[in-house]
Amino acid sequence: MYCDSHTQDALFEQFERINGASGTLIVLFNLRRIETGDFELNFDAPYDVREEERNSLRAYLSVLYLKPRMKVYLRGKKVLTTRILSTLLYPYKYNYTAKNMKTCAIKEFERCEQKVREG
């Protein structure tokens, strides 16, 4: 569902739409408009919500999680999830290290300590 509210209270009111004790509500905001004036996602069609480029939200949700452990439903139909790593031909593991200020400062401190020991 599209949320055009600008206040926090109006946003939290959207969660009242969840029926039952549990559930998920996907809230979209800041949607762009295409040349025709329509939003980039079509909410009126009876089939899957699709972007202008014909990418399916159902296809996106099917590969969203690395190890899918929950059932995902879109418009009342179950989304068949796939393990994305099992579909890749040449999987590659990349260890990412964050480059935030604290990490950079620690590395710089270690370099300075080593220069002091050497010098």
Image: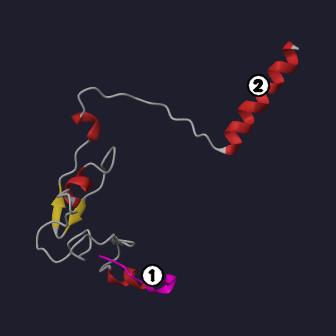
Q: Residue flagged by tag 1: what amino acid is it?
A: Phe
Furthest-front residue in view? Answer: 35
The x, y position of residue 24, in whole percent, is 33, 69
Mark toward the viewer: 1 or 2: 2
On the image, numbered disc 2 is attached to which residue? 111
On the image, numbered disc 1 is attached to which residue? 12
Q: Quadrant of the C terminus?
A: top right
Furthest-top residue in view? Answer: 118
Magenta span covers which residues?
1-12
| Of residues 1 and 37, the one drawn nearer to the viewer in this rendering | 37
118 left or right, relative to 30: right
| Of residues 111 and 12, the one drawn nearer to the viewer in this rendering | 111
With respect to residue 57, does 45 lie above or below?
A: below
29 left or right, relative to 76: right
Q: Quadrant of the N terminus?
A: bottom left
Q: Residue flagged by tag 2: what amino acid is it?
A: Arg
Q: Would residue 85 be counted in the magenta stretch? A: no
Measure the alpha-carbon separation of dots 1 and 2: 49 Å
- Residue drawn at point x = 26 percent, y = 68 percent: 40
Q: Secondary structure at mark 1?
A: helix
Q: Would residue 10 be counted in the magenta stretch? A: yes
| Of residues 62 and 71, the one drawn nearer to the viewer in this rendering | 62
Quadrant housing residue 92 = top left
The x, y position of residue 105, in whole percent, is 74, 38
| Of residues 50 and 72, the one drawn nearer to the viewer in this rendering | 50
The x, y position of residue 95, in whole percent, is 49, 31
Q: Secondary structure at mark 2?
A: helix
